[in-house]
Amino acid sequence: MPNAYISGAGSYIPPLVFKNDEFKTKYDMDTSHEWIEQRTGIQERHFAERGVASSDLALPASQAAIKDAGLVPEDIDLIIFATLSADKAFPGSAVYLQKKLGLLDGESKKFVACLDVRNQCSGFLYSLSTAAAFIKSGQYKHVLVVGAETHSAALDFTTRGRTVATLFGDGAGAVVVSATEEDRGLRCSFLGADGRYAEELKLDLWNIAERPYVDIGNDRSGPGTVRPEILWPQMNGKVVFKNAIERMIMALMQACWDQKISHEEIDLFLFHQANKRINDYIAEQLGLPAHKVPSNIERYGNTTAATIPLLMDECKRDGRLKKGMKVACVAFGSGFTWGSAIIDW
Ligand code: ACO
């Protein structure tokens, strides 16, 4: 059975920087740089321009990851696209990315398989685990896994939306997962979910149980009105915070137990970047030294499915992540869903 390792990584952040104080200066939101920084660690995030979709952000990240792996797009057997801000309600974003990668151009079209994963903040780890399973089964040799988000399109920039709007940013991170006979790669992954908390962090816009599923007025002729609490994401921040800490520690420990290692033997911890206070608290509880727990939430905010591959790519490029290292990844998010993984890089 082949091993599944990460053969390449890439990322892309849209150029427009949006600083904390711009919520106040541009939208008159009742918030401040100090509040956001103290509660979350975020100083700024990047927002995509109007007209840019998640598959557009995913394209340069994917191209960079494929190049880093020493491959060309035609070598990819499967595209897995993790996102909560898909280009459209359907089809999934992976098929848009397939076309943008040029796989359908010219004479020799490559009708590579495409799969969307809708697991929010843990979407990347669910996708990585799925990619590795395909590789280990022998079905595929190279799987592109990309996490990309265009949150800025669905944030409420009024004071009503400040608890959620100030947390999120746009961006994309991608990896190529490849088959190898070398003794390295993804050693284990643990995925979990607790649907009792599904309502604690959600976007109700598409409510398929309703007729019609978006309110277009009583006579169904449209245009109707869309209530703000349906249009924008809703979050119970304190419940998310508490569960994130508990579940991330548990998932991390589960992976260590499986590998019969202590967390001291891990060289680098790539945590989902939701809130610096969550990650600092976990690091403190486990006694992890700061240099082993890199952070980039200061610059990007929470980019949901993109946080871990983005951080992975940054660490790989600046030398913090090197071949031979033992790496632990852990994420938690809406659902609630969570995941952890241990990788011998
Ligand atoms: N600026 C100013 N005031 C604000 C803001 C803001 N951006 N957001 C909320 N407040 C106000 C609240 O309205 C509240 O005011 P009130 O007391 O008059 O009602 C006050 O600040 C305190 O609000 P709390 O919700 O108690 O603040 P808390 O310390 O819990 O911090 C936060 C809120 C930052 C959202 C925190 O709960 C959190 O980080 N939770 C985790 C959420 C998260 O990470 N979500 C990401 C998605 S899931 C994932 O990726 C893990």
Image (spheres, rainbow, N blue to C red):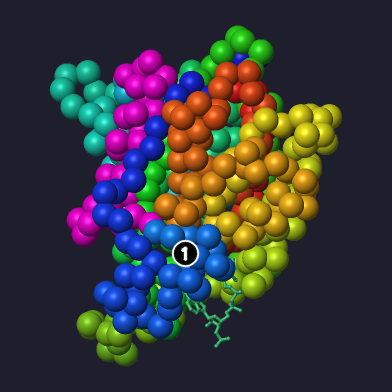
Q: Give residue 38's quadrant in the image.
A: bottom right
Instruction: Please state, as top left, top right, bottom left or bottom right, where the C terminus lies in the image.
Output: top right
How many numbered tags mark residues here?
Answer: 1
x 64%, y 23%: residue: 325
Of 295 and 188, the residue lying toward us: 295
Residue 289, can we see it? yes
Horizontal arrangement in the rendering, residue 250 relative to residue 135 (left or right)? right
- Residue 234 % position (x, y): 50, 74
Whether 263 is drawn above or below 18: the answer is above
Asked whether residue 64 is drawn in magenta, I would say yes
Residue flagged by tag 1: what amino acid is it? Leu
Horizontal arrangement in the rendering, residue 149 relative to residue 5 (left or right)? left
Instruction: Please state, as top left, top right, bottom left or bottom right, where the N terminus lies in the image.
Output: top right
For the view shown, which residue lies furthest in the left direction?
106
Whether 218 is drawn above or below 128: the answer is below
Horizontal arrangement in the rendering, residue 265 relative to residue 151 (left or right)? right
Q: Label 1's element?
A: loop
Over which residues does the magenta segment extend?
45-72
- Residue 158 % position (x, y): 36, 80
Asked whether residue 62 is drawn in magenta, I would say yes
Q: Which residue is mark 1?
A: 167
What is the crowding at mark 1: few (fewer than 14 residues within 10 Å), some, or many (at least 20)?
A: many
Q: Quadrant of ligand 1?
A: bottom right
x 61%, y 15%: residue: 2
x 64%, y 34%: residue: 268
- Residue 247 % position (x, y): 72, 55
- Residue 315 % position (x, y): 50, 33
x 46%, y 29%: residue: 318
Residue 206, can we see it? no
